[in-house]
Amino acid sequence: QDRLLWLHSIFALIYFILTILCMAHHSVHLEYRENEKVARTLMVTHIPKEITDPSLIIKHFHEAYPSCTVTNVQFCFDVRKLMKLDVERRKAMKGRLYFTTKAQKEGKIMIKTHPCARIFCCRFCGFEQVDAEQYYGELEEKLTDEFNA
């Protein structure tokens, strides 16, 4: 009944058909090109950490697979644990710096280190209180040693 709705529908259909025709026209000129660079990479996992010499791995592949040619050996490492340790170390460093500046203004600050200590705020629950600056300093040092190991 509404002429504007019909007009809108007809223009939408014409636009749709024109779009398909334009795409068909321009896709004719596209040609498929195969990538000339071919990477033949083999990833080997669970190599013992004691093996750090690439020549040992090349020698192994030459002995086990004489028809294959090994051109390069590169060692890769899973750095997820290192990244997590670094994030934790930075948090500990920020905590130490925060409590150092706060201790200069207010004096020695004691904190409860148990994860549930914030929920249970009574003093009789048995949560040990430690010096905040010392706690975060020791935590930062422990995480730094673990990160560098």
Image: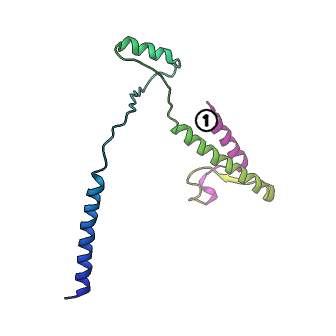
Is 134 inside the magenta-drawn segment? yes
Q: Residue at 40% of width from left, 17% of height from top?
A: 69
Residue ID at (58%, 40%): 85
Front residue of 119/66: it is 66
Residue 91: x, y in percent?
Answer: 63, 48
> Image point 28% across, 64% down: which residue?
19
The secondary element bearing badge 1 is classed as helix
> Is 4 drawn above or below residue 10 in the view shown?
below
Residue 128 in view of the camera: yes
Q: Is residue 37 above or below residue 51?
A: below
Q: Is residue 143 left or right of residue 45?
A: right
Q: Position of residue 125 (x, y in %)?
A: 59, 55
Residue 38, picture quadrant: top left
Camera-side residue of 89 and 73: 73
| Span colored in magenta | 122-149
Q: Residues within 10 Å of mark 1 (few under 14, many from 20)?
A: some
Q: Position of residue 46 (x, y in %)?
A: 43, 25
View extreme (bottom): residue = 1
Give the amino acid type for the residue marked by disc 1 in the picture.
Phe
Number of callouts in the render? 1
Q: Nearer the viewer, residue 116 or 98?
A: 98
Residue receiving disc 1: 147
Question: In the figure, residue 18 lies in which quadrant?
Answer: bottom left
Q: Residue furthest top?
A: 63
Q: Quadrant of the N terminus?
A: bottom left
Residue found at the far left of this picture: 1
Q: Main secondary structure of the magenta part?
A: helix
Classify residue 105 as left or right of residue 147: right
Residue at 42% x, 27% y is 45
Evaluate whether residue 131 shows in this view: no
